[in-house]
Image (spheres, grey):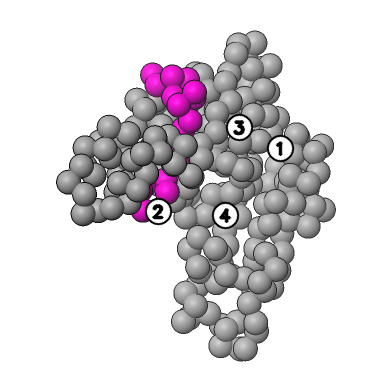
Amino acid sequence: MNGDKIEKIFKECGAIKEGHFELSRSQLHSPTYFEKALLYEKPKVFEKLCLLIAQEVSIRPVKIDAVVGPVPFGAALAWRVAYHLGEISQKEVNAIFTEKDWFFLIPPDVEELLLDESSEKLDKIRLKYGLTRKTVKEGGYLFRKSFQKSVAGKNILLVDDVLTTGGSITELMLAVTRLKGKVVAIAVICNRGGYGPERFFGLPVISLYKMKLKTSLKEECLLCQAGVPVDTKF
């Protein structure tokens, strides 16, 4: 399926919006917004997109043991892409999700200690649970203990619905490598940052649709200068 047909699917779902928006992660301003949540509203559309990703991945010379995606949307994406990869390869492919809330990994008696940077025991505890100071403060992607053995030593496909700055994918890569897993490829529904392998250490980046957004800093935004209010509905 070519890019025009994918774009038509997005527009039929109402996922491509025109106006004046602030992108949540980067805080850049753009006249175009991609509302990914609407793709999940249409099960048949979502299923078709997952199958297309699996088909694109399956023609690459990479072995996939598990598919990893971030909660919430990426978990659904990982599940269905893993299912279709398993059907295509006739081998079991696991689906695993990561979470931002790291407290489920930490015993209750050390939660407060982790947030106390003045504690002398902080570094030892962080080392024990594989947490960086940034993870403790901001919450990075981590796996539940029950998933960790399914990541260690495995070939991992990372999936996400939208690739903008590459920040989320980079955090996913760190979560996988922390457990000695090996990321072998990245797949996204919409690549609106226009990134390729050079952004992710040479790893193949599989995109169903490339959407190069026109963005600007708030201070340089022509729509702001024209007095057009930012659409806050999305």
Q: What is the number of callouts on the image?
A: 4
**Residue where numbered disc 4 is placed:** 192
Q: Secondary structure at mark 1?
A: helix
Spatial CA span between label 2 and label 1 = 32 Å
Above or below residue 125? Residue 35 is below
- In magenta, the rendered stretch is 134-154
Comparing marks 3 and 2, which lies closer to the viewer?
A: 2
Q: Mark 3 or mark 2: which comes first in sequence?
A: 3
In front of the other: 110 or 211: 110
Assign the N terminus to one quadrant of the image. top right
Above or below residue 234? Residue 224 is below
Spatial CA span between label 1 and label 3 = 12 Å
Query: Residue at image x 59%, y 49%?
Result: 162
Q: Mark 4 or mark 2: which comes first in sequence?
A: 2
**Residue where numbered disc 1 is placed:** 49
Residue 50 lies in quadrant? top right
**Residue where numbered disc 3 is placed:** 78
Classify mark 2: residues with Cα within 10 Å, few (<14), some (14-19) or many (20+).
few
The residue under label 4 is which amino acid type?
Arg
Expressed as whole percent of the image width and height from the top left, the position of residue 12 reads 82, 53
Expressed as whole percent of the image width and height from the top left, the position of residue 62 reads 49, 22
Spatial CA span between label 3 and label 4 = 20 Å
Comparing marks 1 and 3, which lies closer to the viewer?
A: 3
Q: Secondary structure at mark 3?
A: helix
Spatial CA span between label 4 and label 1 = 16 Å
Comparing marks 2 and 1, which lies closer to the viewer?
A: 2
Residue 30 lies in quadrant? bottom right
**Residue where numbered disc 2 is placed:** 138
Classify mark 3: residues with Cα within 10 Å, few (<14), some (14-19) or many (20+).
many
The residue under label 2 is which amino acid type?
Glu
